[in-house]
Image (tube, rainbow, N blue to C red):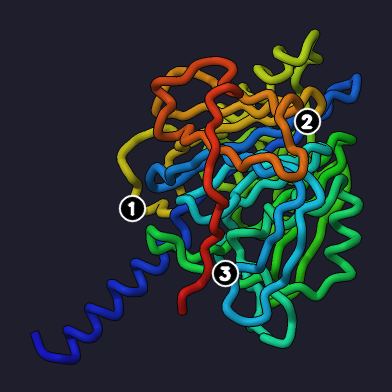
């Protein structure tokens, strides 16, 4: 093989690798408000491998510094929170003591946080969800601050080589919701109680347009059954809008679990024609009204939870953790007493 052919082959392999890396991650988030105003939010985490996810407990009053090399934003956490970390480098979902929660999901293709301007304060992408739950009690507060702020977000490459092409959802105890996507360096915001479902690509406006093609949403197409983000968005919306009203909070948790299990991606042989589909590795449900955080690994048959309404988030309290993904086979039911004291968490940053 001549040098040109070798170069071409290497280039082709690189393109294929980047395509698969960018397109390999999928997730689903569903927000549900019952007739009596009880609020639940569930999500699937679809990933190529276990990500060492752990519960982290943060008291209020923690001094934070943006995980960037130049001109980091600094703040002190106003609220205590419970978060689920990924690879021990960042928060990819969580909820604070006031009931504001955040979930980070992949949005491949069009995500662009813009060129870094070192004159503008910044945070690392690993802190994006944590920044919101540290500082705001409601979706309205968070979005008002988002619109007024010129804070930049700096992405990074994850330990498995994937770029952080993500968007974020925010939810609160009132059932309010917001989806934030960065397109061409600009934050695009969808805010309102009607925005109950989020998956992945394409962008949210296109997801909403696609939904209109299906029965009960204005079109005549039958409910789709593929694993891709568009189909999962339609199914999650349909099933969550047709849930029966629960008689108690536990029944409500079971109901939202039924929806996110429906849109989960089962284990199976990878499909080379569909690199944008990864198996679900865990599911979570947060009962924003009752203050419970549920975790279900797809590698184990049990569901566990933490009563975060009973945790000590006071200033000066210890940070705590529980390696829930590693220890899931040894855990069952209420695991609030399994949390142990932890050293301060260090958020990952771009090393380039």
Q: Which mark is residue 272?
A: 1
Measured from the top left, where is residue 121 in percent x and y? Answer: 73, 77
Q: Nearer the viewer, residue 144 or 23?
A: 144
Residue 182 point in image, percent of width and height: 70, 68
Q: Position of residue 278 (x, y in %)?
A: 43, 45
Q: Nearer the viewer, residue 190 or 134?
A: 134
SS assignment at label 3: loop
Between disc 1 and disc 3, the foreground one is 3
- Do the CB atoms of the residues marked 3 and 2 lie less than 8 Å apart? no
Q: Please give the name of the residue rendered at 68% of the width and 86% of the height, measured from the top-left corner.
A: 117
Residue of label 3: 155
Residue marked by disc 2: 288
In this view, the residue farthest toward the bottom is 3
Q: Nearer the viewer, residue 296 or 194?
A: 296
Horizontally, residue 267 falls left or right of residue 215, namely left
- For residue 315, above or below residue 338: below
In the rendered image, is residue 101 in sight? no
Disc on the earlier residue, 1 or 2 = 1
| Res 225 label | none
Quadrant location, the N terminus: bottom left
Determine crowd level at label 3: few under 14, some 14-19, many 20+ residues with C-alpha closer than 10 A.
Answer: many
Dot in front, 1 or 2: 2
The earlier-in-sequence mark between 1 and 3 is 3
User: Label 3 vs label 2: CA separation?
Assistant: 29 Å
Asked if residue 143 shows in the view, the reply is yes
Q: 10 Å neighbourhood of mark 1: few (<14), some, or many (≥20)?
A: few
Disc 1, SS: loop
């Amino acid at each position: 093989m001549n040098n040109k052919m070798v170069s071409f082959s290497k280039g082709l392999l690189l393109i294929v690798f980047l395509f698969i890396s960018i397109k390999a991650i999928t997730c689903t988030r569903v927000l549900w408000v019952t007739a009596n105003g009880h609020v639940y939010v569930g999500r699937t985490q679809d990933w190529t491998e276990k990500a060492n996810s752990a519960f982290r407990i943060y008291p209020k009053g923690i001094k934070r510094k943006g995980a960037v090399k130049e001109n980091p934003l600094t703040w002190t956490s106003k609220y205590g929170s419970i978060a689920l970390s990924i690879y021990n480098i960042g928060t990819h979902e969580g909820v604070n003591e006031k009931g504001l929660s955040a979930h980070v999901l992949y949005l491949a293709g069009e995500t662009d946080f813009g060129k870094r301007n070192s004159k503008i304060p910044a945070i690392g992408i690993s802190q994006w969800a944590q920044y919101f739950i540290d500082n705001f009690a409601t979706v309205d507060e968070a979005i008002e601050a988002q619109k007024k702020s010129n804070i930049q977000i700096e992405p990074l490459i994850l330990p498995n080589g994937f770029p952080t092409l993500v968007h974020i959802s925010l939810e609160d105890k009132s059932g309010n919701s917001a989806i934030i996507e960065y397109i061409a360096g600009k934050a695009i915001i969808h805010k309102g109680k009607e925005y109950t479902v989020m998956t992945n690509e394409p962008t949210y406006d296109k997801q909403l347009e696609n939904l209109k093609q299906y029965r009960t949403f204005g079109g005549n197409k039958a409910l789709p059954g593929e694993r891709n983000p568009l189909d999962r968005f339609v199914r999650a919306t349909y099933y969550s809008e047709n849930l029966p009203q629960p008689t108690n909070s536990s029944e409500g948790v079971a109901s939202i679990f039924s929806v996110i299990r429906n849109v989960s991606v089962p284990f199976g042989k990878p499909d080379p024609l569909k690199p944008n589909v990864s198996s679900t590795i865990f599911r979570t449900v947060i009962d924003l009204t009752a203050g419970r955080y549920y975790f279900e690994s797809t590698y184990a048959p049990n569901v566990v939870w933490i009563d975060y309404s009973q945790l000590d988030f006071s200033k000066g309290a210890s940070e705590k953790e529980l390696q829930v993904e590693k220890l899931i086979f040894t855990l069952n039911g209420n695991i609030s007493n399994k949390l142990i004291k932890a050293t301060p968490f260090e958020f990952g940053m771009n090393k380039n």
